[in-house]
Amino acid sequence: MTEIITAEPISRRKALALFGLATAALAAASVVAAPEAEAQTVGMTRRQERRGGRHDRRQARRTGRTERRQERRQ
C-alpha cells in the first residue's frame, strides 16, 4: 500500500498494440449493436422483380413441355 507509482514511458509497440485492441473492440461492438434490418434499395427491388419474372417464365416453359409430352404419349 505504500508503493509509489511512477509513470514510465510506453513503447511504440505497446501503443500500437493497445490501439489495435481498442479498434477491434469498437468494431466488434458496432457489429453486435447493428440492427438486423434488410437494406432495400431501388436496384435491389428491381433485381428481385426481374428474378421473379424469370422464375415465372421458366415455370411456364416447364409446364408447357410437360403438357406437350403428355399429349404425345396419349
Image (spheres, rainbow, N blue to C red):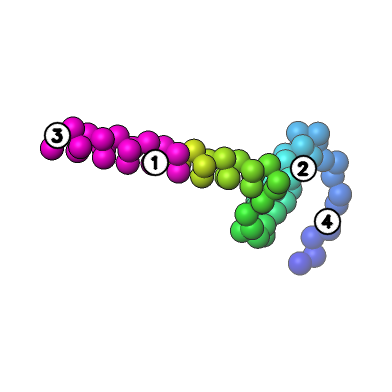
Prevailing secondary structure of the magenta residues: helix
The residue identified by callout 1 is 60
The residue identified by callout 2 is 19
Q: Nearer the viewer, mark 3 or mark 4?
A: 3
Q: Residues within 10 Å of mark 3 (few under 14, many from 20)?
A: few
- Give the mark, 3 or 2, whose residue is nearer the N terminus: 2
The residue identified by callout 4 is 5
Amino acid bearing label 2? Phe
Q: Residue at x 80, y 65 (%)?
A: 2
For marks 4 and 1, give the CA distance: 80 Å
Residue 5: in sight, yes or no?
yes
The magenta segment:
56-74
Which mark, residue 73? Answer: 3
Dots 4, 1 in contact, CB < 8 A? no
Q: Secondary structure at mark 4?
A: loop
Q: Residue at x 13, y 37 (%)?
A: 74
Q: Nearer the viewer, mark 1 or mark 3?
A: 3
